[in-house]
Each structure stands twice: as C-alpha cells, then as structure tokens.
Amino acid sequence: MSTHEVIGVDRGTLKSAPFKVLKADLLAADAVERVLDEAQPSWVVNCAAMADIDECEDNPELAGLLNTELPYRLAKACYARGVKLVHLSTDAVFDGQRDGFYAEEDIVNPNGIYALTKFKGERAVLTENPDAIVARVNFYGWSLSGRRSLAEFFYNNLTNNKSMSGFTDAIFCPMLVNDTARVLVKMLQKGLTGLYHLVGPQAMSKYQFGVEIARKFSLKESWISPRSIHTSNLSVKRSHNLSLATRKLSTDLGTPFPEFSTGLNEFFTLHQQGYPQKIRSYQQ
Ligand SMILES: NC(=O)c1ccc[n+]([C@@H]2O[C@H](COP(=O)([O-])OP(=O)(O)OC[C@H]3O[C@@H](n4cnc5c(N)ncnc54)[C@H](OP(=O)(O)O)[C@@H]3O)[C@@H](O)[C@H]2O)c1
C-alpha cells in the first residue's frame, strides 16, 4: 500500500493536527499560488466552499467567489504547474424533479445561489483544466465542529432526547466521508479525469437515514417525525430526488462502491473508538 504525505490548508482552525497545515485565506490575492509553491503538492483536493445553502442566499457575492472564482483560479494554477486537481461539486446541480439516478451527461438545472455557483465552478474547472477531476459528492461523517453533517444532526438530537423531523420525500445517496476520501485517492491513482458522480450506492430519504442512525446507535427512532419538504418553512426549498447514478465511476475504477451499511458500521465504530473527540482536539 502506498502512503501519502498530507498537507492541510485552513484559515487557522487546525492548531495541532497530526499533519502539516498551511494557514491561508484562499481568497486573498496570490494565496492560491503561494500555497501551491510552498506545498509543492502532487495532488490538490479542493474542499473549500460556501456550502451552506442559506448562507449562499444571504451572501451571493462571496458564494460566487468561493464556489466559482476560487475553483477557476485553482484550476488554472494547478494546470500551469502540472499539479493534479480534484474539485468537489454537488448533487444539488440537479433540480431533483424527476425520479433521480441522474447520470453525468444529464442536464442540470441548479436551484438557488449555492447550486448555481457550484455549477459554474464545475464548468470553470473542466474548461480551464482538462486534467482535473470534478466529483459530485454527498457525504456524512464526524466533523471538527461536531455539527456539520446530517448524521451528526440526527445523532446529537437523538442523544439529547430532542425531537426532530426528517424529510420522507428528499432522496439522496449518502456516503461515509472516509469512504469518499478513499475512493478519491483511487481515482487519483488511476489517473481519471473529467466529471464523476461519487456518492453512496443506496438511495434513501433523509427520514430513513435518520432512522438508520438511530437504530445503529440503539437510540429512540420515534424522536424523528416523518415530514414532507412541501411542509417545511426553510427559506430555500430542498430538492425532491438528488440520487445519482455512479456506474461511470465504478466501471472506470473496476470496483463497486462500499455499501451504505458498511459505511454506517464504520461511522459507529469510529464513534466507539473516540474518533470525534480525536479530530476535535486538532483545534486546540
Ligand atoms: N457535505 C456534503 O454532503 C456535500 C454535499 C455536496 C457537495 N459538497 C461539497 O463538498 C465540499 C466540502 O463541503 P463541506 O460540507 O465539508 O463544507 P464545509 O464544512 O462548509 O467546509 C468548507 C471549508 O471551506 C473553508 N473555507 C471557506 N472559505 C475559505 C477561504 N476563504 N479560505 C480557506 N478556506 C475556506 C472553510 O473553512 P473554515 O472552517 O475556516 O470556515 C471550511 O473548512 C464543498 O465543495 C461542497 O460543495 C458537500
């Protein structure tokens, strides 16, 4: 098995990570070039974004800078240096109106600022950098803040005996983020280029996902009430069916994706092993 040196880039949150971290506001002038020149990476995985849908609606200009302009700059700078780039995009470029399982060649219809700026970001990367990978992802896992992913939303409320709702008609294909990272490394090792769907192999509603979390942790699933997106008072309407077809990627990799149950088992095991506390300690 090959090993990789990891160099993180962040704005100052990671204070004691077990890998080298460069501090940078990637929107600052020349930050992209400075970071690339300092790190001299073989591969770059761009996770920086404004990924909160409501925040994007409130700050469309900043959303455009982070989700479109930054990927454009990274794509150009990586191409000029011969550095392989992976850019993360989203299932939300589709409107979710049909019965899901969108393929890479299907026509997108981004709803809202987040989806639109992310779609423009994908286009910019694919146009500027023919060697790059654009991966439309959807993942869950343990996060630095402890409240970033949908899995943590359900877990936190369930462990605090708090009631919550789960949408029965918002369908997606969740993948454990640790699996997402492992598949991304395989894609890089295989030298893939272009647009790929990288999500879990099983489509389910957000309500069902919450129930799966409750059952795995032996928590009370009755705290989760089934609800329709049509009755929600969220400012940006959530899409109905954002399940993605992943045949292109599994064919090109020659391996099937990890099952949902395997990912959920690992999510549980990581918790039992103290992984959430471990990654949170990187901030102190
Ligand atoms: N989570 C999902 O299921 C999902 C689904 C579809 C697509 N995606 C895509 O996956 C990627 C990661 O998503 P996420 O959920 O992990 O988002 P996230 O938690 O909001 O992470 C975004 C990161 O970008 C960093 N960032 C923002 N502005 C920056 C700047 N000016 N300079 C340097 N770093 C900056 C943030 O740093 P700070 O911590 O300093 O704010 C944060 O670490 C995004 O491209 C998103 O569109 C995620």
Image (spheres, grey):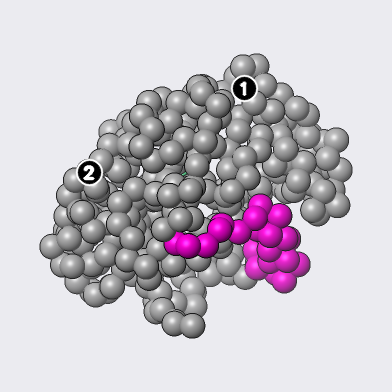
Q: Amino acid at mark 2?
A: Ala
- Magenta region, mostly helix, strand or loop? helix
Pinpoint residue 226: horizontal percent, then vertical percent.
75, 27
Q: Residue at x 48, y 48 (%)?
A: 247
Q: Of marks 2 and 1, which one's residue comes earlier in the chain?
A: 2
- Measured along the vertical axis of the image, is residue 171 above or below residue 37? above
Is 269 covered by the magenta stretch? yes
Q: Which residue is mark 1?
A: 229
Label 2 CA crowd tier, 10 Å (few <14, some 14–19, many 20+): many
Q: Quadrant of residue 115?
A: top left
Q: Residue furthest left?
A: 80
Q: Which residue is mark 2?
A: 124
Question: Visible in this render: residue 270?
Answer: yes
Is 264 covered by the magenta stretch? yes
- The kind of secondary structure element at disc 1 is helix
Quadrant showing the C terminus: bottom right
Question: Of residues 134 and 218, which is closer to you in this image?
Answer: 134
Q: Residue at x 51, y 23 (%)?
A: 98
- How many numbered discs? 2
Pinpoint residue 131: horizontal percent, then vertical percent.
23, 58
- The kind of secondary structure element at disc 2 is helix
- Measured along the vertical axis of the image, is residue 125 above or below residue 236? below
Q: Residue at x 43, y 67 (%)?
A: 185
Question: Visible in this render: residue 23?
Answer: no
Span highlighted in magenta in the image: 253-276
